[in-house]
Image: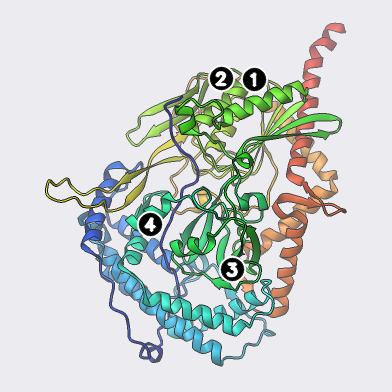
């Protein structure tokens, strides 16, 4: 296994997409001179041609290059820049489809991005017009927040394109009311709401006037690459330089990786051991819409900013404070926004390492091993340093300590574990199942490799529970799936993320020339392989289904591989040869489910938790929000109360100390498992005695 080097952290999609707003008002358009139309540079045309070749020849999914692909790219590009169908009219879309959409496949093969630029230029024109419309309306309108008005906020799924300009402007007026209410109830005290919004609109208008060809090219190429699958991305030379800078390790920051989705900066990953990880408030999928410096600095609206500029705003010296205004993923990214305070720092590697604790449940001593990631110091291992960081080495040490403490069972906590080193996931699995196959890898040509633990014997054979949630991805899913397939333990929690693909980064190189030395044209992160369980099913798309469900507050409609429209499907291959080691049978799982269901029905805390989760889900599922102040405020109050009671699945006790509620429920299941195994062990002796 020493030669294996595949990183499985969820993929970064640093997309420079500015899905912003625009207006058809001819009077407003006449007020400002239009900037020159953006046109592709010769380098971008060349890059486009090479990108097509790489995608056609090397991507795992073999996509037919035909009119169907044209429509996929066209629709995805419109969805990226107008996700809420609040910018283009139906006539605009039809015009663009006729002029551009029907020939994208031909342009793709020849490396001609001009059609994408035509769409983007039209978008920029309307976006500039919309900002002026919003500024003018904000300065003259008086809002009535007593009328029972609503705003559709998921129009891409529920509404057609607006019929005409009048319909667009009515929609924009509602958006303006929504932004006003959001700011009023977001926790920004003492703000002059109108002046703050005016400044935000002016900044965005300035941004639209300063767009460069790279902005259009990257936005369009994102629509092209993600039509193959959501983890295939293009990075321009400037973007790749920032992609290589780990915000949490190279520079002081918050310990998070960010990406652009539509007009928002979205948290793609929380780095274990970083400030955001320790604070446990910022989560994967949260949308960052504002950044403030220090405890008193103005929170600047960063909606529509380039990702590089947002990152620069968040980075800063160690020990300083940054405040983030976010729409939480837990409430489907709907308002009101929350203000999160984070003290900048570097990643603490000790915080990233595996940790243990012992909890008591019904008189049983239960060991808990928390794995924030599957980490490995590749360079330290290569140089054979004495104490290089390794998940396997740390888990071996912890298992020795827990065995010495004579624990009755062990819980492996993989919640929020986004993956990491495949080698470590395979080796750690061996500590619980023994040497043997762990995962299968299939490439684009149909070739298959079975990865095995060949170094580490089983170190623990007692009762085992694996705790997962929707953020458990990649390497975490490989571990949980293997434990399930071997019948080695019980997987509890939420369905996992479902990322079962492998990416490789390749440079887009120009042909060799003896006379010139020209730089590369960027980088392509390409999906090249897929993971499969040893039982034959993939972890892709559906993830690992828990044996016993402990629902979390994470919104499955926002977080997960199946939320991507171009996600590769769940498929199967042949099972590899392996021998289940037990001791957990399907009959055991059924019995444990029944016991947990009976206990949950009598558990007041669990029933209260489910009731609040039901309320939260009802709020999430609404496709519109109220623009009536009393209703808006009431919903805001409900969301805050649920967050205070169960934030990150922690229960507020009477003394205001946090209790890990989900871990507590997992310990109850472990207690049942310990009892079940004890009864099974005692049965032969009782039968013999009788």
Label 2 SS:
loop
Vertical side of 393 occupied by 494: above or below: below
Near mark 2 (Cα within 10 A), the count class, few <14, some 14-19 or many ≥20, is some
Q: Are marks 1 and 4 in contact (CB under 8 Å)?
A: no
Residue 488 visible within the image? no
Which quadrant is the C terminus positioned in? top right
Residue 258 vertical position relative to residue 139 in the rendered view, above or below = above
How far apart marks 2 and 1 lie (CA) works out to 8 Å
Give left or right: position of 163 versus 317.
left
Which of pointers 1 and 4 indicates the residue nearer the eye?
A: 4
Q: Pointer 3: what residue?
A: 292
Task: Characterize the local packing of mark 4: few (<14), some (14-19) or many (20 or more) Cα atoms within 10 angstroms.
Answer: some
Q: Earlier in the sequence, mark 1 or mark 4?
A: 4
Q: Is residue 36 above or below residue 420?
A: below
The x, y position of residue 608, in whole percent, is: 80, 53
Q: Which mark is residue 239?
A: 4
Secondary structure state at the residue bearing disc 1: loop
Q: How many marks?
A: 4
Question: Is tag 3's residue or tag 4's residue first in the polypeptide sequence?
Answer: 4
Q: How far apart in space, not on screen, are marks 3 and 1 (Cα)?
A: 49 Å
N-terminal label among 3 and 1? 3
Disc number for residue 456 = 2
Q: Nearer the viewer, mark 3 or mark 4?
A: 3
Is residue 217 visible to the viewer in this orientation of the structure?
yes
Residue at 72 percent of width and 57 percent of height: 614
Q: How is the image coloured?
A: rainbow
């Amino acid at each position: 296994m020493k030669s294996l080097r595949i990183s499985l952290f969820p993929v970064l999609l640093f997309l420079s997409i500015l899905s912003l707003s625009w207006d058809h008002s001819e009077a407003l358009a006449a007020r400002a001179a239009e900037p020159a139309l953006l046109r592709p540079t010769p380098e971008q045309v060349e890059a486009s041609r090479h990108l097509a070749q790489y995608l056609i020849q090397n991507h795992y999914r073999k996509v037919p290059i035909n009119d169907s692909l044209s429509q996929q790219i066209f629709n995805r590009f419109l969805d990226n820049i107008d996700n809420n169908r609040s910018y283009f009219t139906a006539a605009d879309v039809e015009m663009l489809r006729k002029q551009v959409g029907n020939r994208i496949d031909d342009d793709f093969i020849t490396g001609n991005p001009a059609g994408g630029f035509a769409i983007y230029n039209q978008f920029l024109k309307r976006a500039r017009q919309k900002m002026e419309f919003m500024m003018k309306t904000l300065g003259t309108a008086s809002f009535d927040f007593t009328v029972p008005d609503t705003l559709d906020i998921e129009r891409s799924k529920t509404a057609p394109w607006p019929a005409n300009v009048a319909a667009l402007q009515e929609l924009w007026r509602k958006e303006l009311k929504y932004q006003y209410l959001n700011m009023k109830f977001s926790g920004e005290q003492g703000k002059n709401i109108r002046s703050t919004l005016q400044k935000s609109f002016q900044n965005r208008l300035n941004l639209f006037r300063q767009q460069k060809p790279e902005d259009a090219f990257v936005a369009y190429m994102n629509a092209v690459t993600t039509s193959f699958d959501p983890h295939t991305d293009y990075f321009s030379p400037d973007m790749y330089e920032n992609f290589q800078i780990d915000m949490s390790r190279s520079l002081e920051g918050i310990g998070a990786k960010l990406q652009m989705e539509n007009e928002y900066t979205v948290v793609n990953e929380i780095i274990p051991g970083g400030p955001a990880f320790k604070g446990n408030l910022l989560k994967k999928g949260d949308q960052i819409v504002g950044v403030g410096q220090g405890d008193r600095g103005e929170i600047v609206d960063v909606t529509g900013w380039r990702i590089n500029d947002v990152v620069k705003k968040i980075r800063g010296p160690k020990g300083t404070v940054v405040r983030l205004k976010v729409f939480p993923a837990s409430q489907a990214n709907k308002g009101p926004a929350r203000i999160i305070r984070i003290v900048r720092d570097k990643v603490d590697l000790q915080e990233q390492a595996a940790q243990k604790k012992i909890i008591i449940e019904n008189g049983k001593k239960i060991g808990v091993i928390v794995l924030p990631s599957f980490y490995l110091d590749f360079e330290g291992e290569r140089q054979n340093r004495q104490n290089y960081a390794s998940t396997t080495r740390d888990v071996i040490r912890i298992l020795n300590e827990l065995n010495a403490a004579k624990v009755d069972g062990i819980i492996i906590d993989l919640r929020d574990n986004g993956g990491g080193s495949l080698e470590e996931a395979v080796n750690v699995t061996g500590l619980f199942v023994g040497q043997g196959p762990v995962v299968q890898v299939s490439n684009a040509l149909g070739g298959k490799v079975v990865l095995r633990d060949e170094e580490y014997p089983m170190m623990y054979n007692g009762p085992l529970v694996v705790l997962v949630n929707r953020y458990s991805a990649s390497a975490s899913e490989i571990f949980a799936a293997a434990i399930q397939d071997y019948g080695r333990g019980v997987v509890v929690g939420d369905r996992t993320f479902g990322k079962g693909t492998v990416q490789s980064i390749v440079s887009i190189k120009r042909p060799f020339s003896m006379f010139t030395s020209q730089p590369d044209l960027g980088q392509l992160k390409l999906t090249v392989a897929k993971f499969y369980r040893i039982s034959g099913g993939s972890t892709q798309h559906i993830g690992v289904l828990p044996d016993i469900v402990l629902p979390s507050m994470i919104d499955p409609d926002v977080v997960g591989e199946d939320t991507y429209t171009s996600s590769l499907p769940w498929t199967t291959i042949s099972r590899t040869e392996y021998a289940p080691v037990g001791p957990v049978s399907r009959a055991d799982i059924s019995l444990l489910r029944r016991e947990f269901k009976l206990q949950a029905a009598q558990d007041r805390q669990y029933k209260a938790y489910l009731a609040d989760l039901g309320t939260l889900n009802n709020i999430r599922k609404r496709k519109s929000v109220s623009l009536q102040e009393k209703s808006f405020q009431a919903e805001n109050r409900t969301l805050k109360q649920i967050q205070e009671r169960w934030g990150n699945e922690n229960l507020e006790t009477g003394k205001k100390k946090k209790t890990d509620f989900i871990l507590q429920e997992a310990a109850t299941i472990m207690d049942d498992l310990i009892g079940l195994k004890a009864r099974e062990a005692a049965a032969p002796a009782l039968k013999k005695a009788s």
